[in-house]
Image (cartoon, grey):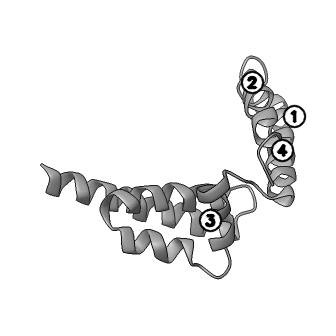
Amino acid sequence: MRHVSRHAWMAAGLFFVALGTIGIFLPVMPTVVFYLLAAWCFGKSHPEWAERLYNHPTHGHHLRAWRDRRAISRKGKVSALLAMSASVPFTWFTLGWPWVLIPAGVLAVIGPWIWTRAE
């Protein structure tokens, strides 16, 4: 059973790396969030791969800041809040009521949480 679990965590980690890599090219998708999830999955299946993510030259410092201090950079906070804020009118114009309540609720709950994280 442990063997299957390890493979499942590794598959999930690879999936999140793929999503994070797509996020590099698509501005509407986050990158670091998916890499954080990938590092967590790799930590359960293949710790060496998690360390490779933590030592990545571009995104590694964001991952280490979260792992060590639960910190989000000011730029990351602003980007996340702007993206969440933009999703509210976008959802209003594309899907309307009551669907707009979903991004509005996420912004109301997650927005303050993001802003109050250490930098």
Furthest toward the top, the residue is: 98
Instruction: Say which residue label 1 marks.
Output: 89
Q: In the image, which disc is placed on residue 81? A: 4
> For the point 80% across and 57% down, which residue is it?
76
* Left or right: 12 in relation to 51: left
Q: Are marks 2 and 1 in contact (CB under 8 Å)?
A: no
Q: Mark 2 against mark 1, which lies toward the viewer?
A: 2
> For the point 73% across and 17% down, which residue is it?
98
Give the class, few, some or many, for how many residues have Cα within 10 Å of label 2's Cα (few <14, many ≥20). few
Q: Identify residue type, mark 3.
A: Arg
Looking at the figure, which quarter contains the C terminus?
bottom right
Q: Mark 3 against mark 2, which lies toward the viewer?
A: 3
Label 4, label 3: how many angstroms apart (C-alpha)? 21 Å
Label 1, label 3: how many angstroms apart (C-alpha)? 34 Å
Q: In the rendered structure, which disc, 2 or 1, sits on the residue that comes first in sequence? A: 1
Give the class, few, some or many, for how many residues have Cα within 10 Å of label 3's Cα (few <14, many ≥20). some
